[in-house]
Structures are given as C-alpha cells and as structure tokens.
Image: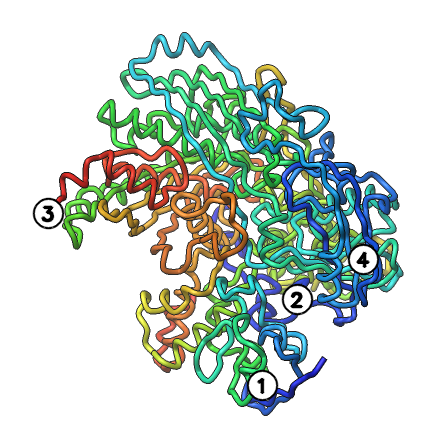
Amino acid sequence: MVKMKISFILNGRPAEGEAVPAQTAVSFLRDSMDQRSVKEGCGIGECGACTIIVNGLAVTSCLMTAAQLDGATVETTEGLAKSGNLHPLQESFIQHNAIQCGYCTPGALMSAKALLAENPEPTRREIRKALAGNLCRCTGYQQIVDAVEDAAKAMRGKTDGEGCR
Amino acid sequence: MNDNDAQFIGKNALHPRVVEKALGAPIFAADLGDGNQLVLKARRAGVHHAEIVSIDTREAEAVPGVVRIFTSADIPGRNAVGIIGNNKDWPILAVGKVRSKADAVALVAAETEAAADAAVKAIRIEWKELPAVLDPEAALLPDAPKIHESGNLLYTRLIKKGDVEAGFAASCHILENEYETPMIEHCYIETEAGIGYFDEDGIMTIEVATQNTHYDQADICAVLDVPEEQLRVVQAVTGGGFGGKLDISVHGFIGLALLHLRRPVRYFYTREESFLASGKRHGMKLKLKTGVDRNGKLLAVQGRVLSDGGAYGSYGIAVVTRTGVHLTGPYECPNVDVEVREIYTNHPFCCAMRGFGTPQGALAHESQMDMHGQALGLDPIEIRLRNALVNGSEQATGQIIHASAGLTDCLKALRPYYDEAMSVWMKEKPGRPSRKRGVGVGAMWYGCGNTAAANPAAAHIEIDQNGQLTLYSGAADIGQGSTITLLQIAAEVLGVEPAKFKSVIADTKYTENAGASSASRQTYISGNATLQAATLMADALLERAGDQLQSPKEDLALAGGKVTLKSNPAVGLPLAQLAGSMHTLGLPMKFRGYFDPDTTPLDPKTGQGCPYGTYAFACQLVQLEVDVLTGEIDIHRVVAAHDVGRMINPANLVGQVCGGVAMGLGYGILEEFAPGVESLKDYHICTSTDVPEIVPILVETPEPTGPFGAKGIGEPSLIPTAPAAVNALEMAIGERIYALPATLERVMEACQKAGWFEKLEV
C-alpha cells in the first residue's frame, strides 16, 4: 500500500513518520510514533480517551487522519513531563486522586492543558465544560475538577498550598 | 488502637502505579507487546437464537494473512465457562446453536487487523433460526422455546421469615407497586483487552484486563485441558471493571490460539464489540408489597422479582440471591416473603455489575419507604431512622447484625443537609416558573463478600535479606486502589511506610488466590489476610530482635523501619539487620495470611442463614431541579454518607463514593442498554457537566472482624443514588416514576400526569 510521509512537531521536536492514506491519527501516533498514552476508547469521538492537542486545540485523534497532522504542532501526554519533572497538571492529578483506573487520564490531561493555555483562571464550571468530552467512569469527575483548579493556581504561580490534600 | 496512634491507617497514600498512569506510560494490555503479535477476532452470531447448520471457513482461510480459523472442534477440553461452579453453561465457541447475537462461532488468527476483519466477514454460516425469547415472562411460558436444555428458569431464590400475611393484617398502611429496571452497560473506558505470549520459563501466559486472575486461570485451563502450572494469567493494568471484567472475554480466545499456534497473540475489543459481547447489568421487574404500622415500622415485605439473565448464567445466581437477601432494604422486618427468579433469555448475558442485584431492589424498597413516610407524615430521614437495622437487629435471613450497623449514624449525618435543603434551598425561587425543585433520600445496606459461600483470600509478605518487604496478593486492582489499601494495612503493622514496600499483584505465578475484586470484598477479606501475614512477619521480627536485644517481645515496637525498645526508642535494630540474621539462621522470611468470612449457606426453601461477615450501610441525598415543561433534569447536589467501618485511605474512599454517585446518577436518569444500542453514539453515561458537586461523608463504625475495623465501599456508593434521584423527582413533579431510567420521556409523562401542562399554560 502507498504510504505517505507525515512531518510534524511532536512535543516540541520535529518528527516524521509514515502513514497509509486512511489511517487515523490515533493509530498513527500509537503504532508509528510510539505515543501509547493516546488511547482509543470508542473510535467515534465520544469518549475523549484519544484527546491530543493540535495547534493549541484539544481534539479527538480518532476523528482525524494521520495526514491532517502533517505540518501541525502536536502535543501528547508523553510530552508533559520535562526532564523528569512532572507537569503541574500531572502532579495535581496525582495529589487529588483524580486518577483511578487511569485510562481516561492522558486525554483529560490534554483537554485540561489546552483549557489552561487559553484560560489560566477557569471557574469550576468552565473546567467541567472543557472536560465534558472526556468520559471518566471511575472518579465522578470531582477530583479531576479539583486537580485542574489547583494546577491552574500552581501554574499562575499563586499556589497557596491549600490545594494539596 | 485509637485514631491518634495510627501511623498509616486513615491517611492518604499514593497508589504504587499512579505516576506511570499520570505519565501515560504504556501499561495497559493494548499498549503491551512488540506489535508483531497475531491479531485475534471472533465471528459473532448476529442472530438471537439459531441452530448452526454449517460453518464454512474455506473462503476465510484463503484471505492473505490469515493463519488459522478455529471452531469449537478445536477446543480440547471443557467448552464451557462460568464463574458459578455448578453452572458452567457458556461455550467459548458455539456448539450446535447460538443463544445470543454475541455468541462467538469462530475465531480468526491473522497477521494483521485488516486480514482478521476480512476473514471474519468471509466465514459462511448457515443458520436455522429459532424463535427468539426476549422477555423473561414469555420465557417461562410452558411452550416457550428452550434456550438451554435445562429450561429457561435458571434459579429461584426464596427468603421466608415470620408470617407475612399476619404482618399485612397488622399493618395500618400497605403499598403494592411494580418497578422496572433496565439492562445497562459497564462502560469502562478501556474495552476488553489482552495479549498472549510464552513467559521467560516458556509458560503460556495471558496478560489481560481482569478482576480475577485465578478464576480466569482455572476456567481457561479446563477449556484447554492443561494443568494450572502450564497457564499463567497476569492482570494487566486494568482500565476499570465494575463487574464487567469478571467473566471470560478475550482470555479464552487468547488461550486457545496460544495453545495451538505457540505464537504471541493479541485481542482488543472495539467499543462496538464490547457493547455487543460484554455482560450487562440484569434488567429486573419487581413487585413489592410492604406494610407498616401506625408508627411507620415495617411489619411485612413481600417481593416477587423476575430477573432477565440473558443467554448465560455468569454471576446470575449470586445476583438474584443478593437481590432477595437485600430486598427489605436496610431495615428490620419480622415478616418476609421474597421470591426472585433468574431467567434465561436470548438477550446479551447479564453478569455482575456494581451492586450485584441490589440497585434494582433499592429502587423498589426506597420508593416504598418514601411513600410510607408521606402517608404517615414522617420525613424520609425519620421513617428510615425508625426502621434502620441497628446493632443486635435480625435481618431477613435470620442473621443477627452484632456490630457496625452504621445506617443510623449515616442518616444522622445527612439530617442537617436535608433540613437545610428543605428549609432554604426548596424555598428559593428557581430561574423559571416551569422549573421545580425536589429533594430525595435513598438508603442501602450491602453484604461485603460473596453471598453465603466460602470466599477466602490469601496474601503473603516477604522480607529479603536486605530488609526489603514485598506484598504478594492475588487481589486485582482495577483502579479502586486495593493495592495501596493492603499496603497501608501491612505498613501499619510493620512500621514501614507503604511506599517502601514492593508489591506483586494478581499474577497466578507469584500470588495465591484472593478471589475476585468484586462484592466490595477486598478491603475486608484480602485486608484481613494481609493483616495476618503482616502480624506473623512482625512477630518473627520482634522475636529475632528480642534475642539480639535481650529483651522480651512485649517490650519492643516496630516503627520507622526498626525494632526499638518501647522504653527507649533510641535503642533499636534496623529491619535490614534483623532480616540479614534471619536469613543467616535459615528462619522463615515469607508469611502467609488467610481469611474467609464467617458465613453459612442459605436454606434453599427459606433463605435462612448467615450470608455475609459484615455489612456496609449508606444513605444519600439528591437535590435536583426539573423543568416540568421540557423534562430536563438538573442535578444540583448529592450528599453521600457512607459507613465504611474504619477509613484506611480516605482519598480512595472519597474516590469510590464520587465515582459510584456518578454511575448511580447515570443509572437513575440516563442509561439503558436497549435494542439498537451499538456503541457510545447511542449510549450516554454522565459527563463532567452532568455530575454535580458531591459532598462525601465518611462515617466510622468499626467492624470487629474487619482489618482495623474496615469494610467495603465500592458498590455501596452507587446503590442509593438512583432511588434518591427518583424520590427527588417525585417531590419536584408530584408524580412518581417507577421505571428506570427517568428519561426525558418518562419525566415528561410524569409531568403530564401531574397536570403541569395545564397548570403552567400561558
């Protein structure tokens, strides 16, 4: 089968891979680019487990083709921790017990990161709205909302220490 | 030990694998392997009920990349699985006939996903269709087609105590109503997934998302006709279970392919295959008649329940037994007459799902309790307080609940929230005149552990010569946090931080059977096994230290990774030194703990006996707003008071409570696995915007037989939510809804019945 070359920025670094024409972005990222944090939970854009950030926007990678990543700036959960240090969102998800089974976690982290980039001081309602596309069957969402709220505080450099329980 | 003394119990501690999960590390079954495994895919029946006339695999075998196609003829052992020992009724691959659309008829092994898909389509099956039985009542008619040779009635559970007719005769208020609950989907975000390979010792190994590796191993060994030492089952990090990963799914197929092909394989269900082939929560029809005296005390409960078990038994017998045992609700009642029947139909098989038959019953008993309260002018908390099981109460099966009956404490904890909701929140004016508010209460009790059956767990704790401690437990952690809970128990006994332990979990090669991570049993049962193993280890360490310090054991304590003199904590021996000397002396370094709760079988005719070692109790409050012209429901708040015995890890407990409430709200107002549901496009679970802020309240009533007093929480968290929501809807609308879920249509129907369309017409 004809393969096409996909050149893009993956987690801040130039990356290149080969995809077949109809291949979904989630399949390409998992199988060709080793981004196993990107989970396929439904294949039809309903569960959000495959959420990645493309050019600053949180999108479901099961509804995109690999070809659409060509030339784009792509972020996955693999790129969150920098030189061994967890991202404040990851730290906060852990501290708030926002992770139970962990399958929805990477997708939720991506949605949260995109939200905070656009709105560094979201209300709880705004956090819930931004995460409405990321289904979680374990937590009831409350701890995820707490985690994002607290990470936002930490990222604004105004952490008052009350957030971590 | 009182709370102030505890070092690690009642404190939060992080799950050993949580950092990997936060990093998105490749730890789930779908992430494992090198990508060179053969792909497995089952050909499913697609028809409800049919005889197989012929299966032609020739065309499929010719598809490039296909390695082999298996049918039932390739199964060397017992082609039947099922968790309940005497009811193994489910073939891995169909023999002669199919009983549900999901039945697997053939299995393809291929080099690629595309080849596997093409081959599945190319398998030709000739059917002789049989009439489908899709209604449990119809399934019981004398001329109904038989789904299994034994007939369509799988099981009847009777619970009989006292004289129910006398109870009704003495009652001043009697209610008789019918309720209906739907099948629902577990809908874990990770679909069923597993890989197969030969491990470093050349043993066939299945690494799979599961809630019970040891059951998997036993049933698959029987299917493959191999001894247990030739098959290893390892739990992959599992993306949720809720009861749906207790049955054999991909594992049987993986085992069959490994056995014949001796090559690594993988099988991951798509969401569509998961919806089609996974077990569901039992749909039930319940008739409940209850009578109370003038003080609101329950005098008689009579229940008749039909449970749609679908095509195969799975946990069905246990599910309906639990429905029957719990049908009085968490209340004292001297006269009980309950019959619950589990019926085969051609629906998807129904299995365990969070609550195991009690959420269905809770809709009925909690609706009745509210209606009795209304009739007698008692508020929902007061009537429940008057009936609550307390220490010393006898429940429906004749068991005396000696301790830790925490419902009264939970109701009292809920009281201020209820009063505030009624006196303040209900008085506020909603945004639009068509929006009406309601407050509802639901309560529950739940026996921790399997029902009236031996359900032991073993656990081991080992120390190596350098003092490294390791916990070995067969208890599958599916995200609920059982591993850290067990580590905290061991840590408390040994005075070593939980994070300093290694843990080996749910791997049949290294861990002993701990039973299923189901029935809210692991904290209680594996917790006790771990406590015993840790206590034996502590004793050995103290003994050794006593010799070396020339001091009696009683004068020594374990703390901070040392054995120290109680009188002078500065004098002590590090565990590493003690372990080194134990090793040199050839003393035991690994200790086994074991626990099996004290239960007795239930009498088949009366259901009398002791089904559980302990019970969890809870009550919840739901505040909601309904638009009586559009049917739209807005959940405002849920307050959830749960008696956990004793908190081991509060954050984990809160996690279970909030997660259970969210799932319970879905059960109450959204979810129904109805015909035509194929995937998440047709099936909606609660999103972050559907779930309100939840107020979890953890109540402690230490259970004398629990580890440090602890009991289970996983299922109790879901059970009261839907009934509380239905009761709140009744207050808001003025009409009761008797069937779940309270969909837009059902709410609109109730609003219409209540006359809101006329009342609010402009």
Which residue was labeled with disc 1? Answer: A83
The residue at the point 64 percent across, 36 percent down is: B311
Numbered disc in front, either 4 or 1:
4
Q: Earlier in the sequence, mark 4 or mark 2?
A: 2
How is colour applied across the structure in the image? Answer: rainbow
Distance from the alpha carbon under mark 3 to that under mark 2: 59 Å
Check whether the beta carbons of the residues at disc 3 and disc 2 lie within 8 A of each other.
no
As drawn, the label of residue B59 is 4
Q: In the displayed structure, does residue B404 sit left or right of residue B748?
A: right
Position in image of residue A160 (x %, y %): 35, 74
Numbered disc in front, either 3 or 1:
3
Check whether the beta carbons of the residues at disc 4 and disc 3 lie within 8 A of each other.
no
Which residue was labeled with disc 2? Answer: B27
Both labels 3 and 2 in a single chain: yes
Check whether the beta carbons of the residues at disc 3 and disc 1 lie within 8 A of each other.
no
Distance from the alpha carbon under mark 4 to that under mark 2: 37 Å
